[in-house]
């Protein structure tokens, strides 16, 4: 017979969990049916990628944040907003507000920043397999494209 621990404020959906469940994960409060912060962040990132993909073909327009046209940082703002997170408006502000990660640790939904002289000037959303969703430039449309340089930074939206 296992002891039952009631944790209403943290796990209202889970109700009660056994003391063994709590001990088995090293004292971290995790209950069946609960989601970790990492899982929640991954779900938001996945949704942001899907939102960006849904805007394929939308025209680039400087300063536009959707829903029908975008500039590069406008697409990231729009996609993450639809996924439940807010981002600052400009590329550099977005870089400054993200958790910086290495290329080896990048994940779908991370922001990809193109930079020069220490300044981020273009951003897209990592789609996996070395590709990004982005709004490239005047005269183009939102599209999926291979990352064309290794000279990029990655940022994870918290």
Image (spheres, helix red, strand yellow):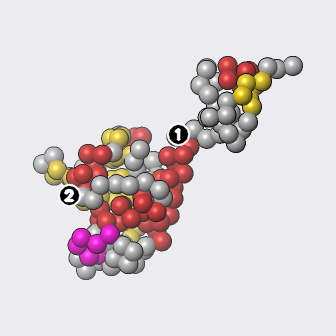
Mark 1 = which residue?
Answer: 37
- Disc 2 versus disc 1: distance between alpha carbons? 30 Å
Range of residues picked out in magenta: 60-65
- Which structural element holds mark 1? helix
Q: Position of residue 28 (x, y in %)?
A: 59, 25
In the displayed orientation, state which residue is furthest to the left.
117
In the displayed orientation, state which residue is furthest to the front.
9
On the question of residue 36 being in view, the answer is yes
Relative to the observer, which residue lies in front, 11 or 67? 11
- Which structural element holds mark 2? strand
Relative to the observer, which residue lies in front, 60 or 116? 60
Left or right, residue 99 beside residue 42:
left
Q: Position of residue 34 (x, y in %)?
A: 65, 39
Image height check: is 61 above or below 44?
below
Relative to the observer, which residue lies in front, 108 or 94? 94
Q: Quadrant of residue 5?
A: top right
Q: Quadrant of residue 69?
A: bottom left
Q: Quadrant of the N terminus?
A: top right
Image height check: is 98 above or below 133?
above
Is 146 within the magenta? Answer: no
Q: At x 48% / y 71%, what residue is drawn?
A: 54
Q: At x 40% / y 67%, what residue is drawn?
A: 144
Left or right, residue 69 beside residue 44:
left
What label does residue 121 carry, if any? 2
Image height check: is 132 above or below 40?
below
Image height check: is 75 above or below 42?
below
Q: Earlier in the sequence, mark 2 or mark 1?
A: 1
Q: Quadrant of the C terminus?
A: top left
Q: At x 52% / y 48%, what residue is drawn?
A: 42
């Amino acid at each position: 017979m296992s002891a039952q621990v009631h944790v209403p404020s943290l796990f209202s959906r889970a109700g009660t969990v056994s003391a063994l469940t709590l001990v088995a994960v090293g004292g971290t409060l995790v209950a069946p049916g609960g989601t970790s912060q990492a899982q929640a962040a991954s779900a938001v990132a996945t949704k942001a990628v899907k939102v960006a993909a849904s805007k394929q073909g939308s025209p680039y327009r400087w300063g536009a944040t959707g829903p029908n046209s975008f500039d590069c940082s406008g697409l990231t703002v729009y996609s993450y907003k639809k996924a439940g997170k807010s981002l600052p408006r400009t590329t550099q502000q977005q870089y400054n507000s993200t958790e910086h990660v290495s290329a080896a640790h990048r994940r779908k939904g991370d922001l990809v920043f193109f930079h020069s002289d220490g300044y981020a000037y273009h951003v897209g959303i990592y789609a996996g397999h070395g590709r990004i969703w982005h709004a490239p430039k005047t005269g183009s449309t939102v599209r999926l494209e291979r990352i064309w340089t290794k000279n990029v930074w990655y940022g994870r939206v918290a």
